[in-house]
Amino acid sequence: MVLMFLLGLSCSNMHLPRWAWRASTAAVQLQLEPPDATVHAVSESGELHEWIDGVQEAEPGEWTLQIEREGWNTKWLEVEIMSGEMNTVPIRLSALPHRLTIDGYPQSGRASISRKGEILYQGDIPVTMDVLAGDIKIALYEDGRELKQRSFVHDGDRKEFFCLDHFGQLLACERQINVGPAPKAVAFSPDGTQIWTALLAGPPSVEVYSSDTGEQLASIMLEKHGAVELEFSQDGRRVWASQMNTSSVFEIDAATFEVLRQLPSRSSWSKVLEKSYDGQHLYVSNWVGDNVSEIDLAAGGVSRLLKTHDTPRGLWASSNGLYLYVSSFGKGTVQRFNLQTGKSKTIFTGATAARHIVLDEERQRMYVSDLRARQVWVVDLESFEKTPLVKVERNPNTIVLSPDKRILFVSCRGRNNAKGYTKRGPDWGTIFVVDALEGRVLDVIIGGNQPTGLAISPDGRRLASSDFLDNRIRVFSVPPTEQLLIGGTRVMEYEKDLLK
C-alpha cells in the first residue's frame, strides 16, 4: 500500500519541502532521527528503493521519500539528486506522545524517567504519564535495595514493573502478578511457559498466567467455589484441581482450559493431589476424612480409601509405583503405604505439624516441613532415621526441591495475627533457600503476607511464590546451583526486615 501510494504522487500536488544539491556523484547521505526510521524512495522513473541512515548511491533526478517509524509522525519529502558533490540530508521525524506506566514492589520505591540526562519525572510510584517517543531510561530505587534500571525506545503505550530486591539477595524478582482471592497453590506447566494458581476464596477457582510476561491466559470456574491444590498429568494435557467445599477433584484440559469432569473423593475436605507414577491413578488427601482417595482415572471413580492418621496432607508417590507417602498434620507423622496391599507403616514421628513432604529418591532422602516447630526434617528412607535439617522462620508450609535435588526452597508463612492466622500478621513471610544436603541457609527472601504456594519451573530457572493474603504471585529467577551453594550475605541481614 505504501509503495502504490508513493508511485501515485506527483510534485505538482504534494507541495513537499525540497532538498537539492549538485554533486559530482549521485550519492545520498541521510541523517535520520530516529536512525532506524524506514525510508521508502521512488525515483522519477518509478524505481523503488529503501534507503537507510548513512550513505547510499542513487540515480540523479527527483525522488519522493516517505519516512516512517512506529511512534513518530510519518513524513513525506521530495529531493532532487544531481551529479556532482555529495551533500547530506537531515530528516527529523516529529515524536508522538505515548502513555508510560511505572509500578514496582515495594510501592515505597521511587521512580526516575530521563532522556539524554534530562529528568522527565522523579517521584513516587505508581506513576502514569505521557512521554514523547524516543530513547528513555527509567530507574526504580529505595534505600537498602538494589537499583533497577532499564533503557529502551519508547514508541508506544507501555507498562514497566520493577521488583526492588534487598542487597545481597541471590534470587532476583522478575515480576509480580496480581491474581484472584487467596492463591493457595501455584504450579508451572510441564513446559514452563505457564503458571497456574488455585484460588481458595474463589471463584474464579483457577487462573493461568504466562511465565514470561505475567499476562493472564485463563480464568476457570469450578462451580461456585475456589480450589486448593493443582497437579499436572505426565503428558501435560490434563490438570487436576481439588476443591474442599465439594470434596472432589476437577479435571481440566490444559490446552483449552475447559473443565472436563468432576471426580468425587468419597470423603471430606479434599486437599493435596498426587498422580501415580504410571499415570493411572490420582491420590487425594482428605483433611477431615482422615484418609486418602485413590481415584482410577480411566474409570473415573474412587477405587479405594486408604485410612490415615489425623488430618493427612502431604503426598508423594514413589517412582517405582510401590509406595505412597502421607504426612499427618494432626499427629506429626509420615506413613508409607504399600500400594499393592494397602497396608501402611509409620516411618516418621515427632513432628508437631507435618505439613508437606518431598523426596529425593536417588539419595533416598525425604524432607518434611514441621509448621509449628519452624523446622524441616530429613528422613533416611532406608534406615528411617530422622535428623533436623534446618531451622527456619515461623510457620513453614510448602517445600520444593530443585530439579537436581540439591537446593530446598522453604516457604514460611510468618508470625500469626493474635486474632487468628486468617488475618495479616505482624511479620512479613519468608522464603528460605537451603542446601538440601548440608542444611546451610543460602539465601532468604522477604515475602508478603503469608507466602504459601511454591513451585519451581521444570528447568529450575524460575521460582513462583504466592502471597496468600495479598492476592499475588511473585516470580524469581534462580541462579545456577553452583552459584547458590556459595551463599549470600542476605542470610545474616534479613531479620531486621521481618517486622512490618
Image: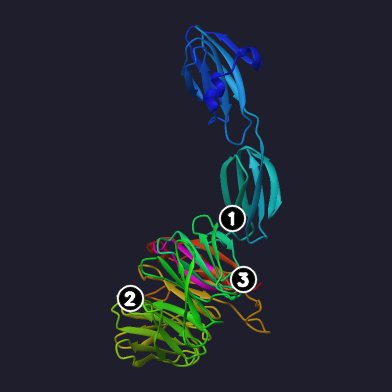
**Which mark's residue is nearer the viewer, 1 or 3?**
3
Q: Which residues are magenta?
A: 451-465
Image coordinates of residue 116 in percent, x first then y, are 62, 37
Find the distance from the CA under tag 3 to the CA under tag 2: 32 Å
Q: Disc 2 marks which residue?
A: 277
| Amino acid type at image mark 1 | Phe
Instruction: Pick whichever of labels 1 and 3 is earlier in the sequence.
Output: 1
Image coordinates of residue 366 in percent, x first then y, are 37, 81
- Secondary structure of the residue carrying tag 3 is loop
User: Does any portion of residue 313 appear in the rendered image?
Assistant: no
Find the distance from the CA under tag 1 to the CA under tag 3: 23 Å
Q: Which labelled disc corresponds to residue 181?
A: 3
10 Å neighbourhood of mark 3: few (<14), some, or many (≥20)?
A: many
Q: Which secondary structure type mostly characterizes the magenta part of the structure?
A: strand
**Which residue is nearer to you in this view: 35 or 80?**
80
**Which residue is nearer to you in this view: 352 or 186?**
186
Q: Which labelled disc corresponds to residue 162?
A: 1
10 Å neighbourhood of mark 2: few (<14), some, or many (≥20)?
A: some
